[in-house]
Amino acid sequence: MREIQRKDKILLLGFNSELTEIKLSDHIIIRKGADHELEEIYDRIKYDNLKTQQFIIEYEYTESNESTFPRKLFKLLDDLNLFFAIFLGGKTKVAYALRHIMSEGEYRQAGFTTNPKVSAHFSEEYFLKIEDSEKIKDYWKRYQLQSENQPIQIALRRYLFSIQKSEQEDQVIDLMIAFEALLVKNNEGSIKRNIATRCSKFLSTKYDREEVYNILIKAYELRSEIVHGSSVELNEMDSREKHAYLGKIIVNLSELLRSCLYRKILEFTNLNSSEFIEELKREIA
């Protein structure tokens, strides 16, 4: 099966920097786009507010010539959006990519990819300072090491789902699945109590331990009620009250999960899921 060389140019939304180029890895570079490159991307986008963005990610890789769906590109888009959510507070995102393939010694346009799950809206941008560039590269390297750990990948994927979905009840379910995948082994007693106890201890230097415990206990109970369609409290609310109530829960859960993932990736980079949970249990004992 023949491999072909590809190069994708991904528009960064909500990003700016004093630097003109940052090399995240051998195959991924953040850089300021040339005018002609940006115009090629702008021409494919219908939102005028995005046509002021100046930075792109250049991604070079090989893929089978039989692959019609850009799998590696979509995997990178998901990884970037997760990475930005965890380490840049979600200010930066990616959704659009101009694809190229190597043909007769030069790259030629091969299509344009839009990720419909990603909202094009952003309210503020992340500004990368020169002194923070090495830190971002280190964070990306540590993030990539988590790809070998299936339970943590489940947690990351469910966190991404919660960001991309608009249905609030689905967001609550995804967030609680993420906590379970990250903090609890299979067949390990009370899932609800283990999530609440371990997360509240793990984040106790940043948040009030009792408050975090109570948030997670109530959220897990709500998750179970949603799954079984038995939430009397939600059923008695009108749509406005329900939206506000669930919105507050989602904000709290998202921030706690983001903080857990942030600390796990940076401070416990090389621990697999089982080793990480055993470390949490030792901290609590």
Image (spheres, rainbow, N blue to C red):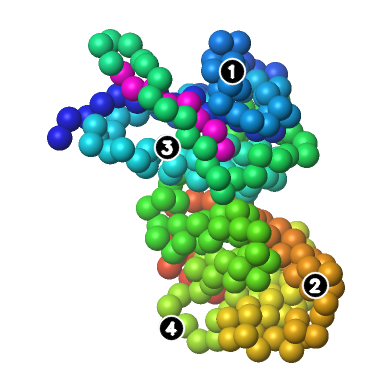
- On whether residue 100 falls in the magenta region, the answer is yes
Query: Looking at numbered disc 4 in the image, what kind of residue is underneath it?
Result: Asn
Whole-percent x, y for residue 123 in the image: 78, 39
Residue at which label 1 appears: 38
Residue shown at 84% from the left, 73% from the top = 241
- Mark 4 and mark 2 lie on one chain; the one further toward the N terminus is 4
Q: Amino acid at mark 2?
A: Ser
Q: Are marks 2 and 3 in contact (CB under 8 Å)?
A: no
Mark 4, residue position: 187
**Nearer the observer, disc 4 or disc 2?**
2
Identity of the residue drawn at 42% across and 37% down: 73
**Foreground tag (2 vs 3):** 2
Q: CA distance from mark 2 to mark 3?
A: 38 Å
Residue at the left extreme of this rendering: 1
For residue 224, say whether it is visible: no
How far apart are the two marked residues, 4 and 2, measured between alpha carbons?
37 Å
Pointer 1 local density, CA inside 10 Å: few below 14, some 14–19, many at least 20: many
Q: Nearer the viewer, residue 145 or 101?
A: 101
Location of residue 14 (image quadrant)? top right
Could you tell me how far apart the alpha carbons at marks 3 and 1 are, in whole angstroms? 19 Å
Q: Quadrant of residue 245?
A: bottom right
Q: Residue drawn at (70%, 86%), measured in percent from left and top? A: 231
Residue 257: give x, y in percent of width and height: 64, 61
**SS state under label 3:** helix
Q: Quadrant of the N terminus?
A: top left
**Mark carried by residue 73:** 3
Q: Is residue 161 left or right of residue 215?
A: left
* Residues drawn in magenta: 95-102
